[in-house]
Amino acid sequence: HIAGATVFITDPNGKMLFCTDLNLAPKDGQIPADILEQVHKEEVFKEVGTLGGAYKQQHYSAAALLLDGNGVSTGYVFATNDGSGLRTYVSNTMSSFVLSAALVLVLSSMLALVLTNRMITPIRRINTAAKKFGEGDYSARVPVEGDNELSQLAITFNEMANSFEATDVSRRSFMGNISHELRTPMTSIKGFIAGTLDGPIPADQRDRYLTIVPEEAGRADGLFHTTAVLAQREGGE
């Protein structure tokens, strides 16, 4: 019914006994003997033609034997369809298939775009944070979403950033303390030498103050040495 086929039954001599649509029945209601012989020879008979002249135009036909309980032929059953009608059916089916395939392709593309964007967005965030981090902005962090491999990578990056930021804060604090400690002996040395040269320090006190200068210079040298050693270790790490 879907394909618009005509089904009819004949007796053993090919005379039509029943037809679903008499208007589409074969000419004279008779199937030629040569067609009946082919049906006997083939398990399932199929043909694209006029069914031995039973039709005036091309038909798609299929036929099979009707057998009784003893396996004796009691007739034939045929199903035929006008070629033009079946071509229309096949064309409509192909159109539906192409439309469905196009719809599936569009939906698949949209889904792939969404999934790809969901995967690329965390990578872009990590890349942006890494660039800021490379420029010295140790406050850069990556938002963590979900519990997949990229989320684990973001967590690892943030932990590294926290470690570097803490190290940077410690380094700045250390350099500030060193600068302060260096400023004290250098100020003393500068003051003692200036006082000795300009005259505020009495002549009988100059030797005592000048002996303090090497001590302050030694203190400053020790701080310079400590700073150099720590800087070398930090650079090596």
Image (spheres, rainbow, N blue to C red):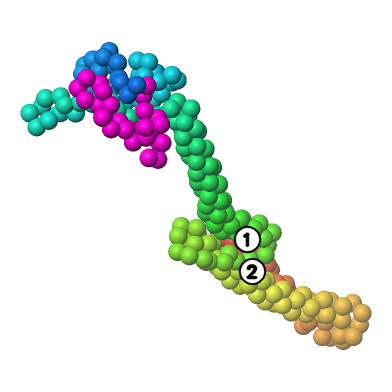
Quarter the N terminus occupies:
top left
Pick the front one: 237 or 178: 237
Q: Give the left or right position of residue 109, taking residue 172 as reference.
A: left
Q: Circle 1 is placed at which residue position?
A: 129
Evaluate whether residue 106 shows in this view: yes
Helix, strand or loop under label 2 = loop
Helix, strand or loop under label 1 = helix
Q: Circle 2 is placed at which residue position?
A: 139
Mark found first going from the N terminus, 1 or 2? 1
User: Residue 59 occupies which quadrant of the picture?
Assistant: top left
Magenta stretch, residue numbers: 1-27
Categorize mark 1 by other alpha carbons within 10 Å: few (<14), some (14-19), many (20+): many
Q: Residue visible at 30% across and 16% down?
A: 32
Q: Position of residue 9 (x, y in %)?
A: 26, 30
Q: Position of residue 68 (x, y in %)?
A: 12, 30
Measured along the vertical axis of the image, is residue 152 above or below residue 197?
A: above
Q: Give the left or right position of residue 193, taking residue 7 as reference.
A: right
Q: Give the left or right position of residue 180, taking residue 23 as reference.
A: right
Residue 21 belongs to the span the image colors magenta:
yes
Q: Position of residue 212 (x, y in %)?
A: 74, 79
* Amino acid type, label 1: Ala
Cα–Cα gap, marks 1 and 2: 9 Å
Q: Residue visible at 22% across and 19% down?
A: 13
Pick the front one: 115 or 81: 81
